[in-house]
Image (cartoon, rainbow, N blue to C red):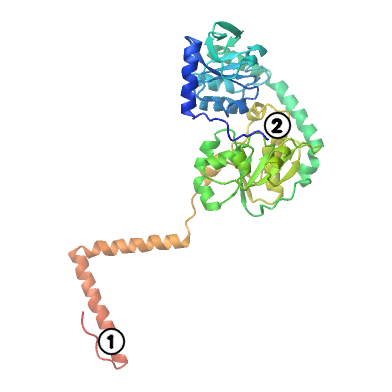
Amino acid sequence: MPRSFSSAPTCNDEAVTALFRRRALTEAGPGVSGPARVDARTKNLTKRLHPGDVAVIDHEDLDRVSAEALVACKVSAVLNAARSTSGRYPNLGPGILLEAGIPLVDDLGPAVMSVREGQPLRLDGNEVYAGDKLVAAGTVQDAETIEANMAQAREGLSVQLEAFAANTMDYVQRERELLVDGVGTPKVRTKFEGRHALVVVRGYHYKEDLAMLRSYIREYRPLLIGVDGGADAILEAGLSPDVIVGDMDSVSDKALRSGAEIVVHAYRDGRAPGQRRVEDLGVEHVVFPATGTSEDVAMLMADDLGAELIVAVGTHDTMIEFLDKGRAGMASTFLTRLRVGSKLIDAKGVSRLYRTRISTWQLVLLAAAGVLALFVALATTNVGQTTFGLFGAWFDDLVNFFRSLVGLAPAPTT
């Protein structure tokens, strides 16, 4: 049976949270404590975190999206086997945890990853205990250490920019046909031509962006393209995705069965680890082999298939965000934006520029309502009643005049 991505507990499962929290406080003793939740992949861990848990991760250069997800789950502490800032570039994650008041202990080593799932842990300074047993010791991150790490990382940013440029040229050589001519884009049944395409990535401020775009979505009815977990974000907003693009590692079974067209992002050599999952679910799909990220694939596909406008939600825009993603393939994101730049607009730009269109019939109804309100107001005054009486007499005279022209007797006076 395939692993179910939709059955994992959520951060809001309060009954389960209370049970684990009481057990942790009973067994762990004084100090910051909670049941351990362990996973080397932070994005997988956040699917089963509860408020009060201790998140145990192995995440070098903790990025902004992961940190915001940990904050949203209201964990009591974050224990990192790796360094949350390696000095490679000024990543944003540690500062976000600090602002939220969540303790972060770094460089604890592989020993901390061996703790049992649900085992009560207690944090005492830079030391982690399971009961009375010392599990590991690391470095507590505070405002001073984070600022020092950021200063060091900013000094080494030029090296990362050089590597980024080299990787960009390598990507151009490998993907020039796709970037220039769109060769390799799969045929899909969804019609893109002449429509707006809204590409949703579960990234930076995606919830706020979707909320801002409700009027735009209701009026323009763009194609909704979910990139992996972005499909679940669309469902959470009360909408239905039209297309789901990705390697299928962070999207729920519910989203895959929602009726959306599935495009499995594969490696350039054709290997598609996510294909087995959709096959096991019995979901029809097509495969798109391409280097780079799934959000790039979604944008390139929308552009090649004739979308009039591409609106991006939760995607990466700045150089720091590219590096914060932590993938060498982020050069593809930079080049993809050059390719689709004439059509691409960020969600916040849409919310600033968008104004609701008012149709002709809406204007007619508005004018009619105004005239009716004026007549009602006049009918309640002496002047208005006199005016209506004079108008009625004039109308009777006009009717009688036309009746006399055709030889009819005058109509009774009202």
Towards the viewer: 411 or 110 = 110
Rendered location of residue 338, percent (x, y)? 70, 40
Check the image and report above or below for 117 versus 256. above
How far apart are the two marked residues, 1 and 2, measured between alpha carbons?
Answer: 84 Å
To which quarter of the image does residue 327 belong?
top right
Rendered location of residue 333, percent (x, y)? 69, 35
Check the image and report above or below for 66 versus 155. below
- Identify the amino acid type marked 1: Phe
Which quadrant holds the N terminus?
Answer: top right
Q: Secondary structure at mark 1?
A: helix
Check the image and report above or below for 359 versus 57. below
Q: Secondary structure at mark 2?
A: helix
Q: Is residue 331 left or right of residue 222?
A: right
Give the farthest residue toward the front. 1
Judge the density around disc 1: few (<14), some (14-19), many (≥20) Cα neighbours within 10 Å: some
Residue at image mark 1: 401
Decide which of tag 1 and tag 2 comes sooner along the chain.
2
Judge the density around disc 2: few (<14), some (14-19), many (≥20) Cα neighbours within 10 Å: many
Check the image and report above or below for 345 versus 103. below
At horizontal 21% and vertical 73% (from top left) the residue drawn is: 389
- Identify the amino acid type marked 2: Met
To which quarter of the image does residue 386 belong?
bottom left
Rendered location of residue 229, percent (x, y)? 61, 36
Question: Quick check: can you spot residue 282?
Answer: yes
Towards the viewer: 144 or 128 = 128
Residue at image mark 2: 330
